[in-house]
Image: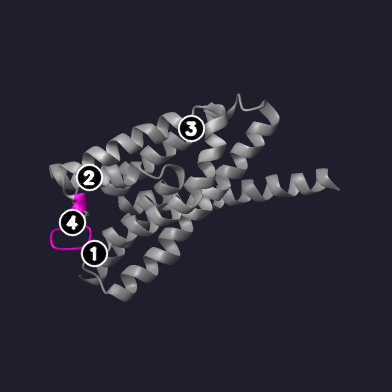
Amino acid sequence: MGIETTIVAALVGLSLASASGFRVFLPPFILSLAVRTDTLDKYIPDLSGTEFAIFDSNAAVLVLGIACLAEFGAYYVPWLDNILDTIATPAAVVSGVGMTSIALVGSDPIIQWSFAIIAGGGSAGVIQVATVAIRGLSSTITLGFGNSFVASGENIASVILTFAALIAPLLAAIFAIFIVVLLVRQSIKITGDKSVQGD
C-alpha cells in the first residue's frame, strides 16, 4: 500500500471510528453492507483472506443490521439510554479500533494497529464520553425528556460521518475532527459547571 493510499485509508478509518463514537453498530453495518454489495467500497480494501473476511458475509450484514436497529431504537427509551452508555463506551472504543484497522488492511501492521488504537479508539472514545456527559446533563435538566433530541443528533451525526467516510474521506475526517473538538469543549464546560455548582 502506497503512502497516498495509506493516508486515504487512515482518513476513512478515522471517520468511521468517529462515527462509532456516536453509534457502535452503524459503521460496521454500513461497511459490511458496502463490501458485500460492492457499493460505496471504493476506499475499502479487499478483506478476503484477512482476519476481517467475516464482514464480507450475509451473516455479518444481518447480525450487524439487527444490532444497529436495536441500538438506534434503544436510545429513545429514557431510562435505557443511560444504562446503554455504560456498555457503549468501551464498545465504541473497540469498534473504533476495528473500523480503523479494517480501513488500513494491507498497510504496514505497525502503522495499521498503532493508528487504529491511538487515533481510531481515541476518537471513538472521546466522542462517546462527550455524548455521555451531554446526555447526563439533558437527563438532569429535562428529567430525561430531552434525551430523544440528543439521541436524534447522535444518529444523524453517525449516519453522516459513516457515509461521508466512504464517499469523501477528507471531508469526513475534517468533519470528524471538528466534532471531536466541539464535543470536548462542550463536555469540559459541562464538567466545569458541575464543579462550580458542587462548590
Query: Which residue is at a point 38% across and 53% down the rendered structure image?
Result: 95
Q: Which of marks 2 and 1 is nearer the N terminus?
A: 2
Q: What residue type is labelled 1?
A: Val
- Which residue is pictured at 37% across the width and 39% down the height? 160
Percent from the top left, x then y, of residue 120? 41, 59
| Separation (CA) of disc 3 from disc 4 | 30 Å
Distance between the Cα atoms at labels 4 and 2? 10 Å
In magenta, the rendered stretch is 47-55
Which badge, 3 or 1, is on the more N-terminal residue? 3
Q: Is mark 1 on a helix, strand or loop?
A: loop
Q: Answer yes or no: do the residues labelled 4 and 1 have beta carbons within 8 Å?
A: no
- Specify the quadrant of the image occupied by residue 48: bottom left
User: Are the residues tagged 4 and 2 within 8 Å (C-beta)?
Assistant: no
Amino acid bearing label 4: Ala
Do the residues bearing badges 2 and 1 touch, measured as CB atoms within 8 Å?
A: no
What amino acid does circle 3 point to?
A: Tyr
For disc 1, the marked residue is 105
Question: In the rendered image, which residue does mark 2 sit on?
Answer: 60
Alpha-carbon distance for marks 3 and 1?
Answer: 32 Å
Q: Residues within 10 Å of mark 3 (few under 14, many from 20)?
A: many
Task: Please say if 26 is above or below 144.
Answer: below
User: Label 2 to label 3, Cα distance in Å?
Assistant: 23 Å
**Which of pointers 3 and 4 lies earlier in the amino acid sequence?**
4
